[in-house]
């Protein structure tokens, strides 16, 4: 699915899971959707599973937004307390669109708690109280960090019901029935061989041939190139490398301190998610990485450079980027906004020392070059995340790896094929809606959210008690009237019948008529069942 197709679906007010490989443009698509909503006078709630991800999209953590904080479960008392907290109640009641980024790092329990809070405050039994939910992420990347409760684990074992880990396994995900938008374009990697390696890891089809490609990029520690960022799996490696390398440089350090404004809790959340440190120590010759996007000045999050000097006014650092451009670096702001108003802000130079960074903090970065050590990888997806930060194979310098470095979570392997199948189905279904019909659905959703894209009579209000999806939901009812099987899952009996009919030589067109589905959905299911190849 293209970004434009996904954006058209988002504008209808549908609940959506926006996914795709690293570099496919998930964040860009969400930014486009947010800009569209704001142009229509609709302010979405922008959240993420981690502080770092939240700063990338200019939002707050879902834990802070919903009021659940660090809780692992919610009692009736907890729900009542959150529901009667005025600022939380006001925030959630007025939300029509909720965006949750990096949902792969959100546990099933946490997603369920957010759902419970929204339903409680909105007094609506629909998932998340009826607001539009946009879940963004890639489950092949880092999984949620979950503290194991031994009593709960034992109970689940006795009942032979393994405890759900991923957000997509939460009961509310199934009730939500998000439309899957699987982006298939690639904007980061432009090296076919390297793309083949990453895709093989993602399919659990990593072979000796792929290993040979990576082995060709293996280097010895004694021959580590200078001034190229190193990605490590543990924090202590990062701090040690950065501190020791800075100390080896001659000259006096110039220190730059973060400025802050707003409630302590919000400021703390901003600091936790900001890649620039509270105290930034720089010297001439220091290798640095930009931590924000500023296309006008010629840098993006991940741009590398070297400090060449410090300007006369304010001693601001002068950085020469890898492309030769010289940049006088000015402080920039990280903010938390709500309903169009800034609630908290911090200000710092958009820089950090770049001799080393953790894999966790590298999510969202695009690097021309990186030295990667996968010898201490301890989690599924960690190696994949690290490798996919680099744009091409020639920019990869690999120190080593262990047996887990090129593996992804087995549960996600199966779920991913379902996501791809559902995305093809959605692409075909929405593709057959006339442009005028799709535009009408866009207009209906803007209207029900109280937006201004459609001119309304003065003082006209949205229907009382209408949810965010409200009238826009009528559009989905019509879609399902026309295409009743568009989003229906496949049963074991249907799979067996499909295998039998396909093996008997029935063409796809006939199979589509038999099962009441689109041709693309039939092909995707045949791929899922291993009966045909993807390029069939």
Image (spheres, helix red, strand yellow):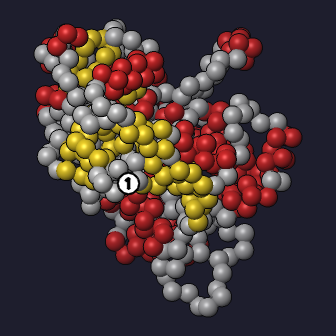
Q: Where 339 sits versus 27, above or below?
A: below
Q: Where 391 sits versus 444, above or below?
A: above
Q: Give the residue drawn at x 26%, y 37%.
A: 284
- Can you say which quadrant of the picture contains the C terminus? top left
Residue 139 horizontal/vertical position (percent) = 44, 32
Q: Residue furthest right?
A: 77
**Left of 448 or right of it: where is 407?**
left
**Left of 237 or right of it: where is 458?**
right
Quadrant in which residue 338 is drawn: bottom right
Residue 299 horizontal/vertical position (percent) = 27, 50
Residue 247 horizontal/vertical position (percent) = 35, 23
**Left of 503 or right of it: where is 15?**
right
Q: Where 97 sits versus 52, above or below?
A: below
Quadrant in which residue 144 is drawn: top right
Residue 276 or residue 31, whichever sits in front = 276
At label 1, counting other C-alpha atoms closer than 10 Å, the crowd grade (few under 14, some 14-19, many 20 or more) is few
Count of numbered circles in the view: 1
Residue 32 or residue 337, whichever sits in front = 337
Q: Give the residue drawn at x 22%, y 28%.
A: 227
Residue 295 or residue 493, whichever sits in front = 295
Q: Where 208 sits versus 270, above or below?
A: above
Inspect this view and state whether residue 427 appears: no
Residue 422 or residue 118, whichever sits in front = 118
Quadrant in which residue 394 is drawn: top left
Q: Give the residue drawn at x 51%, y 33%.
A: 105
Residue 376 horizontal/vertical position (percent) = 39, 11
Element under label 1? loop
Q: Which residue is mark 1?
A: 314
Q: Give the residue drawn at x 63%, y 48%.
A: 266
Inspect this view and state whether residue 142 appears: yes
């Amino acid at each position: 699915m293209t970004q434009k197709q996904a954006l058209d679906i988002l504008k209808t007010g549908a609940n959506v899971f926006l996914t795709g490989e690293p570099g496919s443009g998930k964040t860009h698509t969400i930014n486009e959707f947010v800009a569209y909503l704001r142009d229509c006078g609709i302010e979405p709630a922008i959240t993420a599973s981690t502080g770092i991800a939240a700063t990338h999209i200019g939002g707050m953590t879902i834990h802070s937004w919903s009021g659940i904080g660090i809780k692992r479960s919610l009692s009736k008392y907890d729900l009542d307390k959150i529901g009667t907290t005025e600022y939380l109640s006001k925030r959630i009641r007025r939300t029509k669109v909720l965006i949750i980024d990096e949902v792969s790092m959100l546990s099933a329990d946490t997603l369920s708690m957010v759902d419970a809070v929204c339903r409680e405050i909105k007094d609506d039994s629909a998932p998340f109280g009826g607001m539009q939910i946009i879940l963004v992420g890639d489950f092949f990347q880092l999984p949620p960090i979950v503290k194991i409760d031994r009593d709960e684990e034992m109970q689940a074992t006795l009942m032979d019901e393994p405890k759900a880990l991923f957000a997509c396994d939460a009961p509310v995900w199934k009730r939500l029935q998000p439309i899957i938008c699987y982006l298939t374009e690639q904007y980061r990697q432009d090296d076919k061989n390297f793309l083949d390696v990453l895709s093989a890891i993602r399919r659990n089809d990593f072979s000796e041939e792929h290993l040979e490609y990576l082995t060709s990029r293996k280097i010895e520690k004694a021959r580590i190139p200078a001034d190229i960022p190193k990605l490590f799996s543990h924090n202590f490696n990062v701090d040690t490398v950065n501190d020791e390398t800075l100390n080896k440089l001659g000259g006096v350090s110039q220190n730059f301190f973060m400025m802050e404004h707003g409630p302590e809790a919000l400021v703390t959340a901003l600091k936790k998610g900001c890649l620039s440190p509270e105290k930034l120590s720089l010297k001439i010759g220091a290798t640095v990485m930009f931590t924000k996007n500023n296309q006008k000045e010629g840098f993006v999050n991940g741009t590398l450079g070297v400090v060449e000097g410090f300007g006369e006014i304010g001693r601001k650092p002068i950085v020469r980027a890898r492309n030769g451009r010289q940049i006088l670096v000015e402080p920039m702001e990280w903010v938390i906004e709500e309903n169009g108003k800034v609630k908290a802000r911090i200000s710092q130079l958009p820089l950090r020392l770049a001799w080393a960074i953790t894999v966790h903090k590298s999510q969202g970065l695009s690097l021309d070059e990186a030295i990667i050590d996968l010898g201490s990888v301890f989690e599924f997806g960690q190696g994949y995340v690290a490798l996919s930060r680099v744009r091409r194979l020639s920019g990869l310098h690999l120190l080593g790896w262990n047996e887990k470095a090129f593996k992804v979570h087995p549960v996600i392997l199966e779920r991913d094929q379902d996501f791809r199948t559902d995305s093809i189905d959605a692409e075909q279904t929405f593709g057959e809606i006339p442009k005028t019909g799709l535009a009408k659905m866009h207009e209906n959703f803007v209207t029900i959210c109280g937006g201004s894209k459609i001119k309304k009579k003065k003082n006209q209000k949205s229907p009382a008690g209408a949810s965010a999806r409200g009238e826009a939901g009528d559009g989905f009812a019509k879609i399902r009237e026309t295409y009743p099987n568009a989003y229906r899952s496949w049963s074991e009996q249907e799979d067996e019948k499909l295998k039998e009919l396909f093996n008997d030589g029935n063409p796809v067109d006939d199979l589509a008529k038999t099962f009441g589905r689109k041709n693309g959905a039939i092909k995707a299911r045949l791929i899922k069942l291993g009966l045909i190849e993807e390029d069939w």
